[in-house]
Image (tube, grey):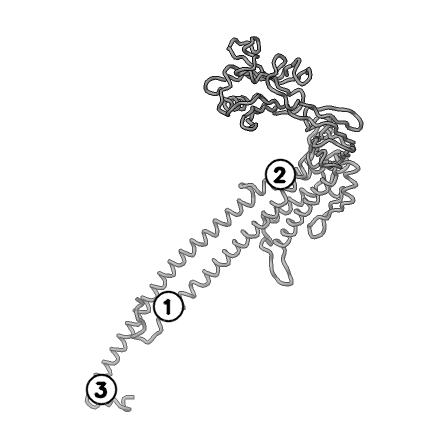
Amino acid sequence: MVAATGLGSGLDIESLVSGLVGAERVPQEQRLLRQETGFTSLLSGLGQLKGALGAVQPTLTTLKSDSTYSAYTSSSSQTNVAAISTATSGNVATGTYALEVSNLAVNQSLTSGTFAATDTVVGTGKLTIDLGTPTYSGSTYSGFSANASLTAVDITIDSSNNTLSGVRDAINAANAGINASLVKDGSQYRLLITTEDTGVVNSVSISIDEDGDGTANNTSTDTDNTGLSQLAFNSTASNMTQSAAAEDAAFTINGLALTSASNVLTDVLDGVTVTLKEQTTSAATLTVADNPGAITSAVQAFVTAYNGYATSATSLTKYDATTQVAGALQGDATARSVIAQVRSTLTNSIATGGSYTALAEIGITTKADGTLTLDTSVLDAAITADSSAVKTLFAGGTVSGAEVTGVADNLDTLLTGFLSTTGVFDSRTDSLNSRVEDIAEQRTTLDRRMTNLEARYRAEFNALDSLLAQLTSSGDFLLAQLDALPGFNSGSDRN
């Protein structure tokens, strides 16, 4: 409860105390507020400048990438027949190619005889799976040449997996280059085996060893089409039916007849992948060409991002004489240093030893406001004349046995240092945040001191009030005593 004050003197002690404390508090509060506002403005400005520089850095990564300077365009006149793509670097066979497809590569498929149910016991023994190239007598193997780069896979079939579904699961778990599935044929079931890869060289040979003598298809029990031998398919026994023979893709490129075990052609044209989809009725045109537009696009993206940074930097550091408003970083040493280093790195010449040593030579110039302008006609001409020199200017490389760093390299290195957790932005931000925290502590100290000052003023004025009350009481007593004296007139004669 606030004590009543001024009763003895009639003074407005509360107003006096509030006024005196306010006169002490307000200048200090305003000083702290000015400091806090200044620090907060600097923090905001530095954050904006850092963000603007951060937006530039991804474009530098693109300018440094080999893929930007080794980009190609590719197209197919019949996308239903063939799809085409190119590598992003290395040798790429540019040109126009006429493609005709007479045959697609297909997988081999084998089907077993019928079984009453999926849990029907097939038999026990060992399946040996080989992949390779067969020779045919009709639709059956008359010979088989196993792929020397692959190892035959043995699959043991015992009482734990000797049913039709058990054999299927055992084959699929063996990673032998074939897939097994069950198909229902009326009320019965067949085992369907399909090679994982297309092409004649990926055909399958399945040999059976039922009696465990270690020699598949060497006795009548291994080829008698009973038990596990029902799944034999090789040059000795063809107890499964070949429903589809493996085939190679057959096609011509510019009239040259070629074959491939796969429909995905990765080694026919350097750096080009062609995926065959259908046979042709007329030749499809495949086109592979250089794509200088990729370089132009990358440069344009950099110029746009840099101009965003430059505009932000100007706004943050300028002083508008008309409005008398200063930017958040006007006069800030950190901002000045960053801006100067970025400008210097961007405009410095590069000792490339090639056709171009400065950005101005390829159409990038600096305007009075610090932003860049790009003359795409000059850039395109430079790329056409010497694209490798354009790459060296931006991304550096080896020149005359020496390593050269390009403009994008140098600027990226500079920005990485600025933007790192130990860079100038974070270091300055940490310092400013510490000062803001210090202001909060100063406010707490000021509040505590003002509370004590208020208590002291109130105590002093209350004491004064009490003294005045006593003096008033004493004066009244003396007057009363004087009035009581004989011959003393308390009327007008007293005065």
Circle 2 sits on which residue?
413
3 and 2 marks in contact (CB < 8 Å): no
In primary-sequence order, the first of circles 3 and 2 is: 2
User: In this orientation, which residue lies closer to the viewer: 310 or 455?
Assistant: 310
Q: Point out the tag, 3 or 1, that comes first from the N-terminus.
A: 1
Amino acid on which disc 1 is placed: Val
Residue 164: where, in percent of width, then height?
A: 51, 22
Q: Residues within 10 Å of mark 2 (few under 14, many from 20)?
A: few
- Specify the quadrant of the image occupied by residue 442: bottom left
Quadrant of res 240: top right
Quarter of the view holding residue 109? top right
The residue indicated by pointer 3 is 483
Q: Nearer the viewer, mark 3 or mark 2?
A: 2
Residue 143 tag number: none
**In the rendered image, which residue does mark 1 sit on?**
17
Q: What amino acid does circle 2 point to?
A: Thr
The quadrant of the rendering that contains the C terminus is bottom left
Decide if residue 252 is on the left or right side of residue 473. right
In the structure shown, which secondary structural element does the residue marked by tag 3 occupy? Answer: helix
In three-dimensional space, the C-alpha distance between marks 3 and 2, rounded to whole angstroms, equals 100 Å
In the image, residue 427 sits, relative to residue 205, either above or below, namely below
User: Marks 3 and 1: CB-CB under 8 Å?
Assistant: no
Name which residue type carries label 3.
Asp
- Mark 1 against mark 2, which lies toward the viewer? 2
Q: Nearer the viewer, mark 3 or mark 1?
A: 1
